[in-house]
Each structure stands twice: as structure tokens, then as C-alpha cells.
């Protein structure tokens, strides 16, 4: 196996749920190199890939599909903040999340929709609606696996800024 492929595999194993662009940045490799080696590693059954909200995230084979989706969301700053807040509070209303995290309610709604579809969060049926973790113990175990990198946090913050500019323009 090539040295580059070993570096890619080792990096994915050390940072489960890392997305394609982060691998490229962390290992300082060209796009084509990363694409080639990830494809070979996935095709050879050495790694798994999970596509979550437009990003390909890579994993060691030890993670089941629910863990892969949850880890992918935990690698995203805003989704992680929502998950951590719901975990800390046990259950929370979406409007309170928006106020506490100082983000637009539409942004919370978008994340909640994705996290609910991924079986990370569960919405209550009573009114006012509250959110809770679908699997609190399993989710808590995954918190220690993920520690987002500075570039991940900066990209997420940039996307939040752009989202808020569009929301402000739509409101005016």
C-alpha cells in the first residue's frame, strides 16, 4: 500500500467522521490524490463513507450507520451545539435553542429537521414541541470521539454568517 494511502487511512481512523475537504487540508494533498485514495480504500473495504447534507464523511469500519451519521453531525459546529445543548438540558423547545444559541429560528428548524431525519433527535408530539436525544447514552459516548478542528469551526461560522445575511435580506 502506498504511503499516501496509509496516511489517508490513518487520518480517517484517528478522526472518524472527517469530511473530504478536511482530509485534503489536514494532509496537504491535492484533490485528485485524496479522491483516488479514498475511493480505493472504500472499494477495498478498508473504510466506509457516509454522505450527510452534501458532504462525504469517512470512517473506520467499526462504526454502524447511526454512529456514522451522528459523528458527521458532531463534526459540524452548529449541529454539535444543538446536540450538546439538548443533551445538557434533557429536552428543550426549538425557540429556546434559537434564543440561547443566538441563531435564527429557521436555522434551528433546518438543523432539527436534519437531526430528526438522522435519528439523532426526537420531536415531542405535544405542544409546545420539545426536542430530546433519540439515544442519549450512545450520543454521549460519541462526544469524546469528535473534537472539531479550527478550520471546521471557521468554515461552519462562515456558512452561518452567509445564512444570516440571506435571512436578513429576506426579512427586509
Image (spheres, rainbow, N blue to C red):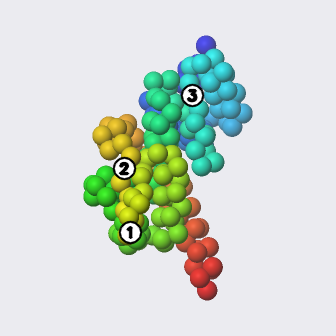
Pointer 1 residue: 127
Mark 3 neighbour density, 10 Å: few (under 14) some (14–19) many (20 or more):
many
Mark 2 neighbour density, 10 Å: few (under 14) some (14–19) many (20 or more):
many
> In whole angstroms, how far apart are the C-alphas of marks 1 and 2?
18 Å
**SS class of the residue under badge 1?**
loop
For the residues bearing labels 2 and 3, Cβ distance under 8 angstroms? no
Between residues 58 and 127, which one lies in front from this camera angle?
127
Q: Quadrant of the N terminus?
A: top right
Mark 1 neighbour density, 10 Å: few (under 14) some (14–19) many (20 or more):
few
Pointer 3 residue: 48
User: Residue at (45%, 36%) from the top-left corner?
Assistant: 67
The label nearer to you, 1 versus 2, is 1
Please determine whether, in this image, residue 127 is positioned above or below residue 18: below
Q: Position of residue 117 (x, y in %)?
A: 52, 49
User: Residue at (59%, 67%) from the top-left corner?
Assistant: 162
Between residues 160 and 71, which one lies in front from this camera angle?
71
Pointer 2 residue: 133
Residue at the bottom extreme?
A: 172
> In whole angstroms, how far apart are the C-alphas of marks 2 and 3?
25 Å
Q: Quadrant of the C terminus?
A: bottom right
Q: Position of residue 63 (x, y in %)?
A: 46, 29
Please determine whether, in this image, residue 50 is positioned above or below residue 73: above
Write down the quadrant of residue 125 in the picture.
Answer: bottom left
Write down the quadrant of residue 58 in the picture.
Answer: top right
Amino acid at each position: 500500500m502506498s504511503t499516501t494511502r496509509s496516511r489517508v487511512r490513518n487520518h480517517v481512523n484517528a478522526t472518524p467522521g472527517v469530511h473530504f475537504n478536511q482530509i485534503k487540508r489536514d494532509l496537504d494533498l491535492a484533490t485528485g490524490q485524496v479522491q483516488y485514495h479514498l475511493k480505493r480504500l472504500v472499494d477495498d473495504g478498508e473504510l466506509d463513507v457516509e454522505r450527510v447534507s452534501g458532504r462525504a464523511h469517512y470512517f473506520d469500519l467499526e462504526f454502524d450507520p447511526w454512529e456514522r451519521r451522528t459523528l458527521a453531525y458532531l463534526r459540524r459546529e452548529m449541529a454539535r451545539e444543538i446536540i450538546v445543548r439538548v443533551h445538557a438540558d434533557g429536552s428543550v423547545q426549538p425557540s429556546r435553542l434559537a434564543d440561547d444559541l443566538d441563531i435564527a429560528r429557521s436555522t434551528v428548524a433546518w438543523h432539527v429537521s436534519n437531526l430528526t431525519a438522522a435519528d439523532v433527535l426526537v420531536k415531542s408530539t405535544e405542544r409546545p414541541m420539545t426536542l430530546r436525544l433519540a439515544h442519549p447514552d450512545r450520543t454521549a459516548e460519541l462526544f469524546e470521539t469528535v473534537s472539531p478542528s479550527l478550520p471546521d469551526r471557521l468554515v461552519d461560522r462562515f456558512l452561518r454568517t452567509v445564512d444570516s445575511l440571506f435571512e436578513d435580506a429576506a426579512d427586509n
